[in-house]
Image (tube, rainbow, N blue to C red):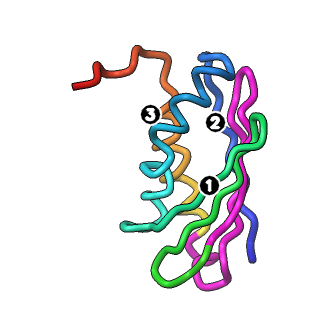
């Protein structure tokens, strides 16, 4: 397993960042692979997660801080060769999710 650490700064405060992550986490992991089956569990401001992508299991956790989210993803060796690409895509999607703009209205 190869760990990949991603820091995503934000100006939302911990409560709003956590709310957005609860609603949009599948979009972030969708950057690793389409159709990922995700499980997650919150303990305080830490979310542990695992997902099955392309027949491979990835796991990790993220910590919600007042000004950033720190995510660590453990990639199996098969996906480790794509670590740089995965990190960039996950970071970009995370930044979009945590932009300091009002969330879209719910239908």
Viewer-proximal residue, 18 or 65?
18
Mark 1 secondary-structure assignment: strand
What is the chief secondary structure element of the magenta stretch? Answer: strand
> Residue at the spot x=59%, y=63% of the render?
84
Q: Position of residue 28 (x, y in %)?
A: 48, 49
Q: Please tell me whether mark 2 or mark 1 is closer to you in this view.
A: 1
Q: Position of residue 8 (x, y in %)?
A: 63, 36
Residue position for label 2: 8
Q: Give the spatial CA distance, label 2 vs label 1.
A: 19 Å
Q: Local crowd at mark 2 within 10 Å, few (<14), some, or many (≥20)?
A: some
Numbered label attached to residue 40: 1
Mark 2 secondary-structure assignment: strand
Q: Give the spatial CA distance, label 1 vs label 3.
A: 21 Å
Q: Local crowd at mark 1 within 10 Å, few (<14), some, or many (≥20)?
A: some
Residue 71 in magenta stretch: yes
Q: Please tell me whether mark 1 or mark 3 is closer to you in this view.
A: 1
Q: Position of residue 43 (x, y in %)?
A: 77, 42
> Residue at the spot x=37%, y=66% of the render?
34
Residue position for label 3: 96
> Is the N terminus in the top left, top right, bottom left or bottom right quadrant?
bottom right
Range covered by the magenta-colored residues: 58-82
Q: Give the spatial CA distance, label 2 vs label 3.
A: 10 Å
Q: Point out the tag, 2 or 1, that comes first from the N-terminus.
A: 2
Residue 7 in magenta stretch: no
> Residue at the spot x=58%, y=78% of the render?
79
Q: Point out the tag, 2 or 3, that comes first from the N-terminus.
A: 2
Residue 70 sits above or below residue 20 on the image: below
Relative placement, left or right, of 103 versus 91 is left
């Amino acid at each position: 397993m190869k760990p990949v650490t991603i820091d995503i700064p934000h100006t939302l405060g911990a409560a709003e960042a956590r709310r957005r992550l609860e609603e949009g986490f599948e979009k972030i992991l969708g950057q690793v692979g389409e159709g990922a089956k995700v499980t997650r569990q919150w303990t305080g401001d830490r979310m542990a997660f695992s997902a099955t992508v392309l027949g491979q299991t990835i796991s990790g956790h993220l910590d919600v801080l007042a000004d950033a989210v720190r995510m660590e993803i453990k990639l199996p060796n098969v996906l480790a060769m794509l670590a740089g690409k995965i990190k960039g895509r996950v970071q970009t999607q995370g930044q979009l999710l945590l932009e300091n703009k009002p969330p879209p209205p719910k239908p």
